[in-house]
Structures are given as C-alpha cells and as structure tokens.
Image (spheres, helix red, strand yellow):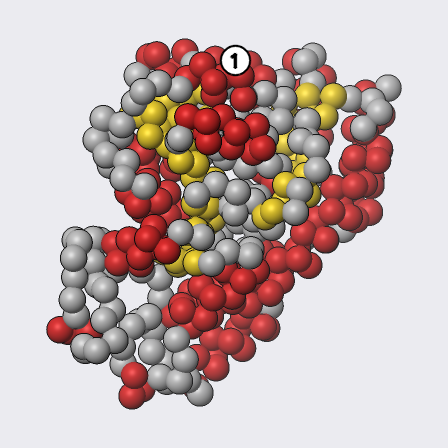
Amino acid sequence: MPGWEIIDKKESNAIQKLFKKEGGVLFAHGFDKFRKKYHVRDFEKLAAKKFKMNYAQAVSSGTAALKIALLSLGVKRGDEVITQAFNFIATIEAILDIGAKPIIVEVDKTLNMSVTALKKAITKKTKAIIPVHMLGVPAKMNEIKLIADRKKIKIIEDNCEAMGGKLGNKYLCSIGEIGVVSFDFSKSITCGEGGMIYTNNKKLFKFMREYHDHGHENNKQLPRGMDTRSIYGFNYRITEMQAVIGKVQLSKLDKIINMQKKRYNQLNKKLKNHIELREIPKNSKITYDTFIFFIKNKLLRNQIIEILNKKNFGTKNLPDAIKWHCSAYWDHALNSKQIKRSISTKNILSTAIAVPISLKRTVDDYKNLGNLILEMLT
C-alpha cells in the first residue's frame, strides 16, 4: 500500500531545498544559469541503477509509459497486443490510443496472465505481449518469455503495481524488452503523478527520450531553441518538483516493502492453512502490497467484506473497484469477443477478497484482523 502513507519531512525538505538553494527551476531542461541540479535526470539515473537497467525514462504517467513503450516497439494501427483480463483499464487505453487492437487472455490463480491462454491467443498479427504484475505478485515471466522468444514477440512488463518485486534474481520490469512503472498517488512510491520506462536497448531508449519531449534530440552542440529532431513526439514530461519527491520516495522503497511484509505475514500466518490463497509463482519476491484469498461461499464472503469495511481496512480492487480492474466490464472499450474472453477471470475474481496492506495500520492491527477472519472460517 502506497508511499503517500510515509511522506514526511524528507520530501518537504527536499522541495524547500529546490526553491531556496537550487534555483527553483521546475522544468527538466535548460535554464542553466538559474539552476544547480537536474532532478529529473538524477531520478532517471537512480531508478535505472536501483532496478539494474541501462536506461530509464521519466514520463508523466504509467499510462504514458505504456503508450510510448508500444510506439518504441513499432506497434501500429491494426496490430494485436495481448494483455490480461485482470488489469487496470490504462493498459487497454494505451493500446487503443495508438490504433492497435487489445487481445484479452484470462488469468490463472496467480491472478496474472494464464500461460495456457496466452499460447492460444497468439496470431500472425501479434506484435507485443503485456503481462501485468497485479497487486504485488509477478506473472509467470519465465514461461511467458519462453513463448514470446519462440514467436519473436516483444514483451512490455506492466509493473505499475509490483515495484521492487523480483522473479529469481531479476527485478520485475527488467525481464522483457521494456518495463514500465507508475508513480501515481496510490502506488508503492509516488510523486503525485508520473511514470518510468525501463530498457536495456539503446535504440528503444533514444526513441523514448525524444518522443516524450516533442521529438527533441537534446543536441549538446545547440541551444534548446535550435535543437535538432528526426521524429515528431508529444509532451509526456515530468517536472523537477515531481522528480525531487520521486528521489526521496525511491530511497524509501525497500523500507516500504519490509514494513508491508510484516503486516502481510500476520494474515498469512493466521490464514494459510484454513483458506485458499492466491498462487505465488516459484522463486518470487513479492511486494506484499495486498493479501488475497478466495471464498466461494457468497454469504461468508459478504460477511468478511463487511468486517473489513467495519474495521476500516476496506478491500483493494476486489471487490471495491473490480469494474475498473476486470475487462469483463469494459464494453465501452472492447468488443463482445474480448468481453467473452474475460468471463472466466470475472468468475475467479468474484470469489476473491483483496485486503490492502496499509502502513497506517499497525502489525497488531493485522494480527487481530487475522484472528477475526479465522474465527469466521472455523
């Protein structure tokens, strides 16, 4: 649960320093005489180093990151892009916005992309695959990458909801050709809005760098007003102020995950032998963002949800925001064929409960909650 919960004097002091000691320039480019630092560029370097990537490009949102990633891979109008039915609609919007066609596949009990469904969905028109690491848990990337490599299809990892997670010794967002994260206010770390695109491919990075900034090549031999360009782009930049906060938040990420783990483990310890839990892929390091379990008995499920609401824990996406996170509900954006591809996922999600792991709540709060739920189960 999100970085906004531990925003403190460190973020505030960093913002004050920007204004009082570093020139107060909020634009990521130019104004060299008035500034002492380039915070967006620093943020990118720190983010790339943190996740062991060659390149990181800061952009205005996770949605913008997805769109730019698709464009950098040459996805064009009419191409098919495969993604999963449990998701956030932003992934679909990014695909639609460039004129490509979203192809939905069902999820398995990891609540991420079903490898079996993926195999069946690939056609000659498939240009990219976007697995989504939902709510802190990795997709089965080893199997997905094996399929993609055999078919010579590129992977964009949507890691907006599992920042800091790993599969084996690799960070999520570093396994495919491109990885994206979000810094909106509900994410693991936040700067209000924003996103980052990761890649090890220099050519892809060059496109991202230029496209997000109106096509600017940032030719060091020329002033910005006389800059060279070879492509047109759009404005998906972030501000120096966002980057200042982002750098502080990034330094807190490991702490956030460890704090979440302590709370998550209280629920896991109490309930793991009494209820069906979300499947976790082997060799995963999850981020402990959300504790998810399945209750097929509707009456019991409703009673547990009532307790969660009464105790002010609430539910995260399941069921409180399911209509924004399951493609079965997106008939405003998808055709009937893709809606039908989402029904199995809808049925799985309708038995799930997602307990948000909040740093505003104590470890004992989660211990007591585990006891309450356990009493209802036994």
- The quadrant in which residue 314 appears is top right
Within 10 angstroms of label 1, few (less than 14), some, or many (20 or more) residues? some
In percent of width and height, residue 233 lies at: 20, 53
Q: Position of residue 9 (x, y in %)?
A: 59, 73
58 above or below 279? below
Q: Residue at x 54, y 62 (%)?
A: 49
Query: Is residue 25 something one can see in this rendering?
Result: yes
For the point 66% across and 42% down, the residue is: 168
Looking at the picture, tell me which residue is in the foreground, 197 or 248.
Answer: 197
Image position of 238 with respect to 118: above or below: below
Asked whether 278 or 356 is in front, the reply is 278
- Splitting the image into 4 quarters, where does residue 205 fall? bottom left
Residue labelled with disc 1: 344
> Residue at (31%, 86%) from the top-left corner?
34
Q: Nearer the viewer, residue 258 or 193?
A: 258
Is 36 situated above or below 140?
below
Locate residue 59 relative to residue 277 in the image: left or right: left
Q: Secondary structure at mark 1?
A: helix
The amino acid type, in three-letter code, at marker 1 is: Ser
In the depicted view, which residue is nearer to us: 184 or 161? 161
| Residue 322 % position (x, y) | 50, 27
Q: Quadrant of residue 122?
A: top left
Task: Left or right? Give the position of 27 relative to 300.
Answer: left
Q: Position of residue 344 (x, y in %)?
A: 52, 13
Q: Residue at x 41, y 17 (%)?
A: 121
